[in-house]
Amino acid sequence: MSKLLQEVIGELSKLPGIGRRTALRLALHLLRMEPESVAGMTRSIDRFRQEVKYCSVCNNLSDEEICPICADPERDRSTICVVEQVADVLSIENTHQYKGLYHVLGGVISPMQGISPSDLKIGLLTERIARGGVKEVILAISTSVEGETTLFYLMNRLRPFEGLKITSIARGIGFGDELEYVDELTITHALRNRREIE
C-alpha cells in the first residue's frame, strides 16, 4: 500500500467514529474528487481550526466575540441551559423547543481523565448569574457517572444564588425500552421524574 495512502488513513482514523476501513473509503473518495474540491475542503478545515472563536458569554463556538444565540434579542435571557459540549447546543436547537440562552461547560468532571471543576467554564457561568436577570438554570448534563458528578457539583455551586430556580432535564426510560434491560440509575431517574397521568 502507498505510504501516502497509509498516512492519510492514519490521519482520518484519528477522527471520532472513523475506523481504518472508513478512513480508507474516505481517502479513496478524496482521490476521486476534483483537486480544486479537495483543496477547498482542506482550506475550509484549516481556516475553521485557526479562526473559530468561543463566545465570551456562553463558551459556544462563534465566528465573532459573541455567538448569534447570545446576540439574539428575541431569546429569553432569564433562562440558561447548561450543557457539556457545543454538539449539545446543536441537538437542543434542532428541536426548536427551547428559546433561552446556553452555557457550554466544555466537558464534565472526570478525575480519571484529570478533568477537575477548574478545567470547566463554571466560573463564567456563576459570573453570568451574579450579574442578575437569570431566573432559571436548566442542567442538561449526561447521565454518565461523570455527568452525575458534574450535575451535583453544579447544584451545590448554584444553590447560594437566592431565588434561582435550578432544574434538570427529565431523565428516564426511553420509549420502547424494556424495564429488565434498563440500568438502575436510569430507573432511579425515571421514578424521581414520574408525573401524574391525566
Image: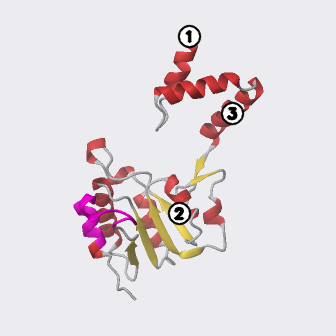
What is the distance, in whole Å, between disc 2 and disc 1 at their CAs? Answer: 43 Å
Which region shows up in magenta? 173-190
**Residue underneath mark 3:** 41
**Which residue is located at x 33 percent, y 54 percent?**
117
Depth check, front residue: 171 or 41: 171
Query: Residue at the spot x=61%, y=45% of the render?
Result: 52
Q: Which mark is residue 2?
A: 1
How packed mark 2 is, by other alpha carbons closer than 10 Å (few <14, some 14-19, many 20 or more), is some
Look at the numbered disc 3 and give the secondary structure of its residue. helix
107 up-or-down from 171: above or below: above
Q: Quadrant of the C terminus?
A: bottom left
Q: Residue at 49% x, 57% y: name it.
A: 88
- First in residue order: circle 2 vs circle 1: 1
Residue situated in front as seen by the camera: 39 or 187: 187
Nearer to the camera, 190 or 98:
190
For marks 3 and 2 on the same chain, the one whose residue lies earlier in the sequence: 3
Check disc 2 and report the residue beneath it: 92
Residue 32 falls left or right of residue 58:
right
- Crowding at label 3, few (<14), some or many (≥20) Cα neighbours within 10 Å? few
Kind of element beneath mark 1? loop
Find residue 175 and report its horizontal and vertical position in percent: 40, 66
Residue 139 spot, x, y in % from top left: 40, 67
The kind of residue tagged 1 is Ser
Q: Amino acid at mark 2?
A: Ile
Left or right: 57, with 112 as reference point = right
Tell me how far mark 3 sits from mark 1, CA to CA: 22 Å
Residue 155 visible in the current orientation? yes
Q: How is the image coloured?
A: secondary structure
Query: In the rendered image of this protein, does residue 139 appear above or below residue 104?
Result: below
